[in-house]
Structure formats: structure tokens, C-alpha cells
Amino acid sequence: PHQRESIILSDIGIVLWLASIAGSVYTYGFWTVFWLYLVPCLWINHWLVLITFLQYTDPTSPPLPCLRVYFPPWCSG
């Protein structure tokens, strides 16, 4: 309930983003938007996922230290 305004603003932002993509497809055509927007997004996401995967699975990197994590009482239900 206390984050209601943030959720509504986020939903409005997503709708505006989708509307701008749809407007771009309507104005410039699907393939132009595909090559100038979607392909670069997928390419960047590919590298981010690959680098993250390699960092966490590299056998030469030292293991992460055990961290004590504090969970507030309201997290347990």
C-alpha cells in the first residue's frame, strides 16, 4: 500500500514506452525499429548476461566470503 504511487508511475512509464515503440513502428516500419532498437538491446543484454555468467563461474576467481545477512523480522512473515 505505501508503494502504490510508485507502482502507478511505473505502469504509466511502461505504457508510454510501449506506445512510443508502437508509434515508431507505425511511423518508420517494423524492420527499422527492429534493427535500430531491438537488435542493439538484445546485443547489449547478451554481453551483460555472458560477462555476469563468466564472473560467477570462473574457477580461478576466489569464492565470495560468507556474509552475514540481516533479515528484518517482517521478512519471515
Image: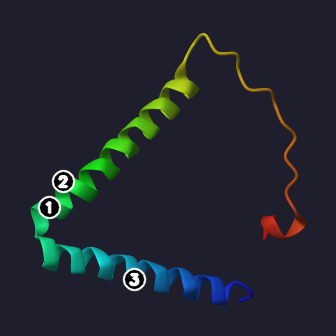
Compute the Cα span from label 1 to label 3.
20 Å
Q: To which residue does mark 3 refer?
A: 16
**Image point (87%, 40%), residue name:** 68
**Image point (27%, 58%), residue name:** 37
Direction from residue 28 to residue 56 in the image, left or right = right
Depicted 40 relative to depicted 47: above or below: below
Residue 22 x, y percent position in the rendering: 23, 78
Compute the Cα span from label 2 to label 3.
21 Å
**Image point (12%, 67%), residue name:** 30
Mark 2 touching mark 3, by CB under 8 A? no
Residue 2 x, y percent position in the rendering: 75, 87
Q: To which residue does mark 2 refer?
A: 35
Depicted 73 relative to depicted 24: above or below: above
Mark 1 is surrounded, within 10 Å at the Cα level, by few (under 14), some (14 to 19) or many (20 or more) other residues, namely few
Mark 1 touching mark 2, by CB under 8 A? yes
Q: Residue furthest front?
A: 28
Direction from residue 5 to residue 11 in the image, left or right = left
Q: Nearer the viewer, residue 45 or 61?
A: 45
Instruction: Choose the circle earlier in sequence order: 2 or 3.
Output: 3
Residue 77 falls in which quadrant of the image? bottom right
Q: Indicate the amino acid at tag 2.
A: Trp
Q: Which mark is residue 7?
A: none
Mark 3 is surrounded, within 10 Å at the Cα level, by few (under 14), some (14 to 19) or many (20 or more) other residues, namely few
Residue 16 falls in which quadrant of the image? bottom left
Q: Please, what secondary structure does the residue beneath circle 2 have?
A: helix
Q: To which residue does mark 1 refer?
A: 32
Depicted 48 relative to depicted 32: above or below: above
Residue 55 x, y percent position in the rendering: 56, 26
Residue 8 x, y percent position in the rendering: 56, 88
Depicted 68 relative to depicted 25: above or below: above
Compute the Cα span from label 1 to label 2.
5 Å
Instruction: Choose the circle earlier in sequence order: 1 or 3.
Output: 3
